[in-house]
Image (tube, rainbow, N blue to C red):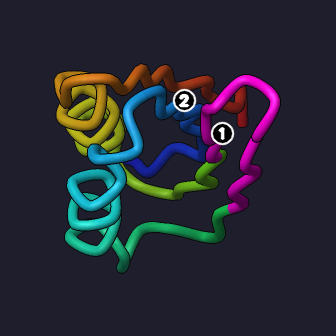
Amino acid sequence: MENRVAVIAIIIEDITASEGVNALLHEYASCIIGRMGVPYHAKGINIISVAIDAPQDKINSLAGRIGRLEGVTAKAVYSTL
C-alpha cells in the first residue's frame, strides 16, 4: 500500500489521557515525521499536531485509537500528494 502524508490533530481535554496518547505515538514512532504540542492553559486543554508518513490504513488506525481514549479527540487531514 502506498504511503500518504497527513497531519493528525489531537485535543486532550483530560490530562490523565496524556500517558495513553504518548504510548500510542511511541508505538507508531517509525512513521512520525514530527510533532508539536501546545498547552492551552486558559482552557485547560492540550493541542498536539502530528505529521505522519504512512499507509492510509495505519494513519486511520492511529487516529482512531487515539480518538477512542477518554477525554481525547483526534482527526486526520491528508495531503493530496
Name the residue furthest bottom.
30
Name the residue carrying label 2.
Answer: 11
SS at badge 1: strand
| Residue 69 picture location, percent across and down | 19, 30
Q: Residues within 10 Å of mark 1 (few under 14, many from 20)?
A: some
Left or right: 45, with 42 as reference point: left
Which mark, by number, is residue 36? none
Magenta: main secondary structure = strand
- Relative to 76, say whether 35 is above or below: below
Kind of residue indicated by mark 1: Ile
For the C terminus, give its image quadrant: top right
Dividing the picture into quadrants, the one containing residue 6 is top right
The residue shown at (31%, 52%) is 21
Is residue 40 magenta-colored?
yes
Residue range of the region highlighted in magenta in the rendering = 36-48
> CB atoms at circles 1 and 2 under 8 Å apart?
yes
- Depth order, front residue of 66/12: 12
| Residue 16 picture location, percent across and down | 29, 47
The residue shown at (18%, 34%) is 65
Is residue 25 magenta-colored?
no
Q: What whole-number distance in Å separates the C-alpha atoms at marks 1 and 2?
A: 5 Å
Left or right: 32, with 62 as reference point: right
- Relative to 55, say whether 9 is above or below: above
Name the residue carrying label 1.
Answer: 47
| Residue 53 picture location, percent across and down | 52, 58
